[in-house]
Structures are given as C-alpha cells and as structure tokens.
Image (spheres, helix red, strand yellow):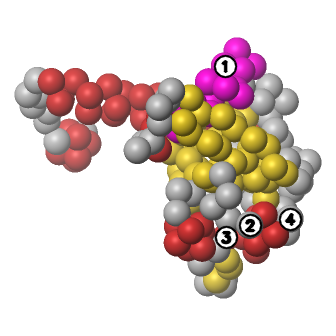
Amino acid sequence: MLKIEELVHAYIHTYCDFEKELVLTNYFQADWEADILIIDAEGMSHEIEIKLSKSDFKNDFKKSYIHKDTGEKFLKHDKISCGDYVCNAFSFLLPMGMVDSNLIPEHCGIIEFYHNADTWNTEFYIIRPPRRLHQDSYWMLNDKDLFIRKMALNLLQRKMEIKGKHEELIFKNPFDLKNKK
C-alpha cells in the first residue's frame, strides 16, 4: 500500500522545480493544513490537497471557518471558490477514477495518480488544471519574514524530533525560561 509520504515525494519530485519554487508539505496556512503548498518565484501559490478515500474527499467540503471578528461561519470551498483564499490555485490529488470529475467543483484542479505496486512507479495525470482564484501574490497576503521564521522553527523542531527518536534528549521547559526573564 502506497503511503501518503511516498505519494507526496513522488509528486513533488516529478513536478516541482526546487531551484525556482518553494515547496512545503503539511503546512498550516489560513485555517487548514495544505498537504502540498507550492509557491513560485513570482509568489503565485498552488495548494494541493490529497484525498485517498471517497469519505475523506466528501469531508473536505464540510470543513468550515469562523471569522474571528464577525463570528460568521464559512465553508472552506465557498471561501476558495470566491477568491477569498490565500492561495492562487487549489487542486485535488486523487487515485485514478476514485471520484467522477463532474462531482469536483470547477474552481478545483484535478490530478489523478496511478501507482503500480509491482514496479513501484507512480504516474500522474492532470485531468483539469486549477482555475486562477485571484491575482494577488502569496507575499501580498502573508508576511514573508514571519513565514521564514516559522519555517526555520519548524525545521528546528523536526530536527529535534528526529534526533530524539534515536537518543534521549532532555530539554528545559521553554515556558519556564520565558517566565524568568
């Protein structure tokens, strides 16, 4: 069985140019986690949401957002389809034939994959390219400096997490350190 990490690896190494694009996986933005987030040199962004089951796909359309100031509730795909979303494009990455493309809203791109378990090759097919949701650069809508600091912190945390799996590490509680200052 193909694991999601293997699928992500296959996709980004097939389609992404690491010299020209910023590629993040499992990155929290807005109110949801992007399975794959690609930001090109001009700041145009593309979120790719991976769905491996029909129920997971259906649940994506139930995700909601509550506006912090007004308390109004919005559905994720209502927010995306009207262009009130941080990304310039949004696509689903799905197993081949899992969902009829007519059931996927027009604002969403569709990428299907076929994984051959015998040869361990994964092929990707762009069924429908994503629609441009708005023209604003990702960096017009996000603080680039804060973004870089968050990436650096995430990298440090992952490094310590991996290192901690191989040896016992003992850290002081960072909250205790802040209280003493």
How many numbered marks, from 0 up?
4
What is the quadrant of residue 181 in the picture? top left
Nearer to the camera, 124 or 76:
124
Q: Any mark on residue 18, and which?
A: 1
Task: Kindly report which numbered mark, 4 or 2, lies closer to the viewer in this rendering.
Answer: 2
Comparing marks 2 and 3, which lies closer to the viewer? 2
Residue assigned mark 4: 106
Quick one: label 2, few (<14), some, or many (20+) residues within 10 Å? Answer: few
Q: CA distance from mark 2 to mark 3?
A: 20 Å
- 117 or 6: which is nearer to us? 117
Please indicate whether residue 174 sits to the left or right of residue 92 in the image. left
Disc 3 target residue: 76
Q: Is residue 101 visible?
A: yes
Q: Which comes before the other along the chain, label 2 or label 3?
A: 3
| Quadrant (top left, top right, bottom left, bottom right) of the N terminus | top left
Q: Residue at x 61, y 52 (%)?
A: 95
Distance (Cα) linking label 1 and label 3: 29 Å
Residue 56 at x, y percent in the picture:
52, 67
Q: For this view, does 148 lie left or right of residue 78?
A: left
Q: Which residues are magenta?
A: 7-20
Q: Secondary structure at mark 3?
A: helix
Q: Amino acid at mark 2?
A: Asp
Which secondary structure type mostly characterizes the magenta part of the structure? helix
Helix, strand, or loop for circle 4? loop
